[in-house]
Image (spheres, grey):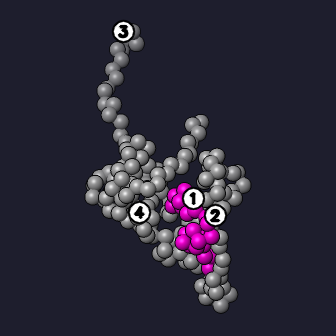
Amino acid sequence: MRRAHYQVESRTRLDTVQGAGWLKQVIDRDRPAKVFIDVGGVGAGVYDQLQHMGPPYAETVEAVNFGSPPFEPAPLDELGRASGGPLNRRAEMWGKSKEWLELPGGVQIPDSDALQADACGPGYRYDSLTRLVLEKKEDMRRRGAKSPDEWDAVALTFAKPVAPAPKKPSNFHRKLVYPPSGLW
């Protein structure tokens, strides 16, 4: 059985053109079925650049806005009112990544102090509607913590289910013909 290889790569201080170029190289090398990009900040420019590159990049990348409402509706209380759940897409995806980490069989993540620190970095609270609110990156910076960019990237993998890429048809079209006697 082939074991999956997991890694997290990150780059800092890239402008949108450099970021798009780096992501293009990653797509060319790894051929992912889908790449989700947070378009709430610098990622919008990276996403736009890859859209302008056309196929296969435009089909591979998908925009996700961390600040948009969650996909899944909030659970209803006994009176039929929405209550609980995540405040936004970022909290929703972080919640799904937390559930993933708690799977009974365990999960594989790279042995990286930076990645593990990111996963534990943001504080959280619940608002008056008992929705999960993750600490804002600006608030984290104010208290001296770095932005959890690497775990944000992991959380983006939970943006929506992705089916494996369909297998490409084989270019093998040769017809094999054996002599009737079975001898050459």
The residue that appears at 62% across and 48% down in the rendered structure is 112
Spot occupied by residue 58 in the image (x, y as percentages of width and height):
32, 57
User: Mark 2 or mark 1, which is nearer the start of the sequence?
Assistant: 2
Q: Is residue 66 visible?
A: yes
Which quadrant of the rendered structure holds the C terminus?
top left
- Above or below residue 31? Residue 37 is below
Choose mark 1 or mark 2, whichever is in front: 2
At label 2, counting other C-alpha atoms closer than 10 Å, the crowd grade (few under 14, some 14-19, many 20 or more) is: some
Residue 121 numbered mark, or none: 2
Q: Which residues are magenta?
A: 131-158
How far is the residue under mark 1 from the one under mark 4? Answer: 15 Å
> Furthest-bottom residue in view?
79
**Residue position for label 3:** 184
Question: Residue flagged by tag 1: what amino acid is it?
Answer: Trp
Query: Which amino acid, by three-letter code, is at mark 2?
Result: Gly
The disc, 4 or 3, on the residue closer to the chain's N-terminal end is 4
Pointers 2 and 3 in contact (CB under 8 A)? Answer: no
| Residue drawn at x 57%, y 77% as measured from the top left | 87
Q: Is residue 130 left or right of residue 136?
A: right
Per the image, label 1 sits on a secondary structure element best described as helix
Work out how far the residue at label 1 is from the one at label 2, CA to CA, in angstroms: 9 Å
CA–CA distance in space, label 2 to label 3: 70 Å
Q: Is residue 59 left or right of residue 129?
A: left
